[in-house]
Amino acid sequence: MSQSQKMALKVQEKLVTRLFLSAKLRQNLTVLSYSSNDLKKVITDFSETNPFVSLKRPKNELQNLDWITSPDEENLLDHLLSQVRLADWDQRDKKIITFLIYQLDSDGYLRIELSDLKQKTEFSLDQLKKTIDKLHHLDPLGIGAYNLNECLLIQAQTKENFNEVALDILKNNQLEKLADPQGWNNFKYSKEELLVALSAIRTLNPAPASAFDTSQAQYLIPDLRFEFEGEDLLVSSSNFDLPELVFNEQEFANMQKNSQGSDKQYFQKQKRDFTELKQAIAQREQTLIRLGKYIGKVQRKYLKSLDLQDLEILNLEQTARDLNLAISTVSRAIKDKYVECQGKIFSLKLLFPRKSVGKLTSQQVELLIEEQIKNENKANPLSDDQLVANMQKNKINLSRRTVAKYRKCLGIKNSYQRKTAEN
């Protein structure tokens, strides 16, 4: 072999190696970006397509067999999530609605106040309020309503020529009053009109989730768990909640022995795919544990108190430098991930608050504004300029425009609107 041929061969070997590592790296990054719920689906789908792979379920999944139902029954969660994936919405709205879907109860209601949900996610109250209407209008209509009255109102407003009396009753949140005929004298409508309205309301569906299988209800699987044992903070991943991929070596050896050509290559590819996915899952866990330990040190005070005031400023750049990782790797590691701590589940991104002013995070500034407005004189609400002045007294310098932005993110009206609403 000539020198030129040897050089060419080395170049080819380097190219093959680079391409192989690149493909492996791509898979590792893709798996890292999956939430635990998404990874669970990927693992399940992979086991169904690879003839040598089976699943070893977590022990807690085998303690109750009530989840076994007819395969013809559609799961509510999958039904809703498939609509979100196909919807022509921006990615932020899709993420918000996906988060809200996981908060639904078994009847399909969202019985948690949005202000409380805001504490679990990086999205603002204003973003949650603007997006929830899209959830309400998924199929089944009325899903994600806060209560029965709201659920029926959502459905009624979409129907053409729906009874106007019934619509007015629902808009005024008087469903319970209508259910008690003894109080009908307090309505402005006649008994006959109320009977017709009641009949119209009975055509609506009070339980949108009733047509779907809810026995297989899925819940958010936290990607990281923080737990205090005395003063020690422990961190663990969600791997023990996920099914484990198991490769049947005996069957693979038998099939390899009795095959040749393209069949043999196919079997080898199945084992290679299994190995690469297992390695990517292991790499994902290792990265998440490293990230969890780092976050635990930085945000220990918050994880102990769960008070937003105790959050420390933390950005991706600093985290990447300290962990010797690429910023894109850290970004994928926190993407769509959730954390469990002291029985509460919240977004991992919540632990990466951005700097707002001085040493304050954006969440801390929001809390300061919210607290001022909460304690204001309702007859003479604080203007944005007054909020700015009060902040300056505490050596917090914010512009009027910035205060207005945070106020709107909190879903709080301006001083004139608050005064008008109070009167």
Image (cartoon, grey):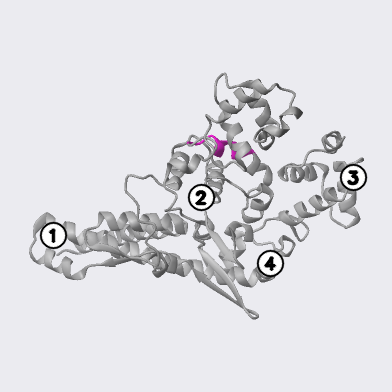
**Residue bearing mark 2:** 106
Mark 4 or mark 2: which is in front? 2
Dot 3, crowdedness within 10 Å: few (<14), some or many (≥20)? few
1 or 2: tag closer to the N-terminus: 2
* Residue 170 spot, x, y in % from top left: 65, 31
Mark 4 vs mark 1, foreground winner is 4
Instruction: Say whether residue 181 is visible.
Output: yes
Q: Amino acid at mark 3?
A: Gln
Residue 342 highlighted magenta (yes or no):
no
Mark 4 crowd level (few <14, some 14–19, many ≥20, 10 Å Cα)? some
- The residue that disc 1 covers is 264
Alpha-carbon span between mark 3 and mark 4: 30 Å
Residue linked to disc 3? 386
> What residue appears at the point 67 percent right and 52 percent down from the top-left corner?
116
Left or right, 15 with reference to 168: left
Q: Earlier in the sequence, mark 2 or mark 3?
A: 2
The spot of residue 395 in percent (x, y) is: 87, 57
Q: Earlier in the sequence, mark 4 or mark 2?
A: 2
Residue, disc 4: 302
